[in-house]
Image (tube, helix red, strand yellow):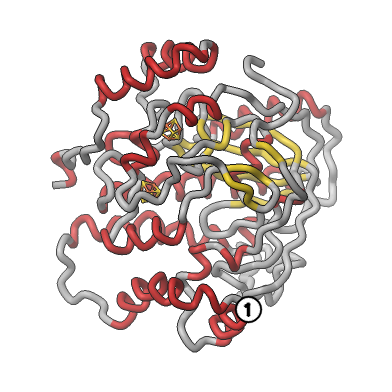
Amino acid sequence: MAHEVERPTYEVVGPLERFDERDTVFARETLMPGSPEERDYHARHPELVEIDRRLAAFIQRKIDNPPEAPEDPLNEAFYDATFGSVAPLAQPDAVDGPVDSYRVEVDPVDMSRRIKAIARQLGAYRVRIGPLNRAWVYTHRGVRPFFEDYRANPPLFAGVPEGYQGLKYGDPIEINHQYAISMAFPQNLSLVRTGPSLLNDFETGRVYAASALAAVELGKYIRALGYPARAHHLRNYGVSLVPVAVDAGLGELARCGYVLTKDLGANFRLVCVTTDLPLALDRPVDLGVQDFCEKCLKCAENCPPRVIPSGEKVEVRGVKKWKVDAERCLLYWGSQGAACGTCQVVCPWSKPSTLLHKFVAEIATRIPAARRFLIKADDLVYGAKYEPAPFPDWAR
Ligand code: SF4
Ligand code: SF4
């Protein structure tokens, strides 16, 4: 396929270190002050006490002071409707489960073709299959749910799969699957462009929910064929999805910290299914994103709290990359009462999939000398400075 290369375009400069899910901002913002988990974590990371208190304050405030009369009740209800619907899909017998005792013999090439076709039927726009590098498997569980008290309800639920029973905060994660199927689900650009806003939350949550269901369905399909498979989505990750998707050739790691694809830019959500089903592998791609991001600073210049670096890449756990300050990003979301997404939509690669955009993306990938001109042209056509779009009539 076009743009395929032997190795992903991120530079490995040292031993790759696995990441502890407890270190993610989404784990740390739910550490309730004084809880055994919080005390344990901050005994090991005293330098994070102050910033984590600020991260946790938004959630704590909501728990302590549930608003009696929300400011915008019709749109505030979106969050529960979309993000709230993902939680049941995080249960252990949704993301994982028993493997059928009858194993269907499959040809890896045919099977890859079939899996991609099924994933597309389930709503994925792009599907790529890569190896699962163990370096991208989290070391320890840090984000809820933990399943300590989870109850199976046969026959509708298969029960708690081995490895999840009693799973709690800080338990080690081991996933030894060979392959990872990465799937990209596009977001409606005009809704994300309203962000930071409750409508952006709606669109983000809608796509998270749809993609989580697809990952769960695909995992169940593979287990019914007699092979292990585990879905990874918003409410239950065992692996870090971005490097997994880059290894599979979905796109490249960009300055904004997202995977950047040729046709969707950064305007999509990722899920994946890890498995031992025999599959033919795709290869990573080189779209010219590293060079493009060197020349383009649009996300960094438009990020409201300026947490995307405009300078050089730095080493992070063995990989050279632009390091986004995730703590200050999340604090900004909290200050706005909604997710931001500005970096996703200002990116020149994130445009509606028109013939013109496809043509421009083709030039951007193939002609390095044209990139500075394309960046300028993007500023002229779409504006250098991000302005949130108005809500459509139905959401006003
Ligand atoms: S989501 Fe918003 S605050 Fe966070 S990095 Fe992107 S632009 Fe910056
Ligand atoms: S906005 Fe520019 S610098 Fe940022 S990710 Fe997109 S191409 Fe790279």
Q: Can residue 218 be seen at all in this image of the molecule?
A: no
Residue 328 on image: x %, y %: 40, 59
Split into 4 quadrants, where in the image is the N terminus? top right
Tell me the quadrant of ligand 2.
top left
Residue 39 on image: x %, y %: 56, 85
Q: Can residue 47 be seen at all in this image of the molecule?
A: yes
Residue drawn where x is 38% and y is 38% of the image: 299
Which of the 4 image quarters holds residue 183?
top right
Q: Is residue 369 above or below residue 198?
A: above
Residue for badge 1: 44
Residue drawn where x is 35% and y is 49% of the image: 306
Neighbourhood count class around disc 1 (C-alpha, 10 Å): few under 14, some 14–19, many 20 upward:
few
Which of the 4 image quarters holds residue 354?
top left
Relative to the observer, which residue lies in front, 319 or 264? 319
Side of 320 where 200 appears, left or right: left
Q: Which residue of the protein is positioned furthest toward the front in this rendering?
A: 311
Relative to the observer, which residue lies in front, 187 or 385? 385
Q: Amino acid at mark 1?
A: Arg
Q: Is residue 245 above or below residue 377?
A: below
Residue drawn where x is 63% and y is 48% of the image: 315
Relative to the observer, which residue lies in front, 172 or 122? 172
Relative to the observer, which residue lies in front, 293 or 104? 293
Q: How many labels, in total?
A: 1
Residue 324 on image: x %, y %: 48, 50
Side of 106 where 381 appears, left or right: left
Label 1 CB-ligand 1 distance < 8 A: no
